[in-house]
Image (tube, rainbow, N blue to C red):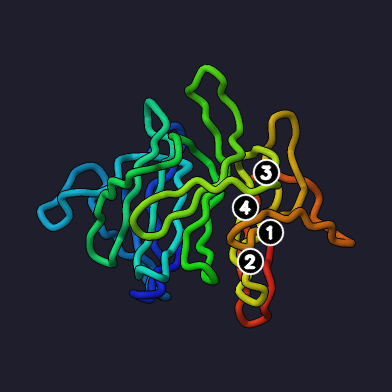
Amino acid sequence: MTYDAAHGQVVLFGGGRDTSFVSDMWTWDGGTWTQRLPANRPSQRFPFRPSTRDGTMMAYDAAHGQVVLFGGSGPTSLLNDTWTWDGSTWTQQHPANSPSPRTDAMMAYDAARGQVVLFGGFDGYSDISGPLGDTWTWDGNTWTQQFPADSPPARYWGTMAYDAARGQVVLFGGTGENSVMGDTWTWDGGAWTQRSPATSPPARSSPSMAYDAARGEIVLF
């Protein structure tokens, strides 16, 4: 789920329900949920949309006025397709480069650099499956892997949000190779920096985090 600032609505897509996946799409206008796509079949108006999936990553790309969706876990395999939503139509993108298939990664829009940032996730279908620790950026046309000198340890089920007051992306927690994590990192467009705050939330997996613009701070629950 992410906020589409160009069209003033929250966009929700897919997810898991009980033991199955769903591929329906809904928008929230502040008072009403509206289903934008049929749950199980293409329609004449919306013939193309992302396939059924869970654990996908989605962020609003303000530089291009569209929502970006990447990857996730399908019914039989992990995915690494990229889609954009312009308020009325899904378009599958075919970038020259792309992150490997994954689920449950962290993704946020870096407004200072005009890029979507993706970190980590889980690769559960390779010979060496486990958490990932790579960093990628989306510029509206292609994905570019970044190679910072320092980087957060590999993880999935963490959380990430853009801190507009300080012009940086904030990453917290998640599940690593052998433990749940409680570390804090910031991304400035070229480097990850580990932070050592005087107080910090206990280590956890799958938290929720968002930027509170009225108070200029990140909120985690």
Q: Residue at x 33, y 56 (%)?
A: 141
- Going from the N terminus, do you reach mark 2 or mark 1 first? 2
Q: Is there CB contact under 8 Å for labels 3 and 4?
A: yes
Q: Earlier in the sequence, mark 1 or mark 3?
A: 3
Q: Are marks 2 and 3 in contact (CB under 8 Å)?
A: no
Residue at point 44%, 67% (across, down): 3
Residue 125 marker: none
Q: Nearer the viewer, mark 4 or mark 2?
A: 2
- What percent of the width, then of the height, locates residue 163? 63, 69
Residue 37 at x, y = what percent? 24, 54
- According to the image, label 2 marks what residue? 168
Distance of label 2 from label 1 (alpha carbons): 6 Å
Report helix, strand or loop for mark 1.
strand
Q: CA distance from mark 1 to mark 3?
A: 15 Å
Whether residue 4 is situated above or below residue 38 in the rendered picture: below
Foreground tag (2 vs 3): 2
Q: Earlier in the sequence, mark 4 or mark 2?
A: 4
| Callout 2 amino acid | Gln
Task: Please indicate, yes or no, whether residue 17 appears anywhere in the rendered image.
Answer: no
Q: CA distance from mark 1 to mark 4?
A: 12 Å
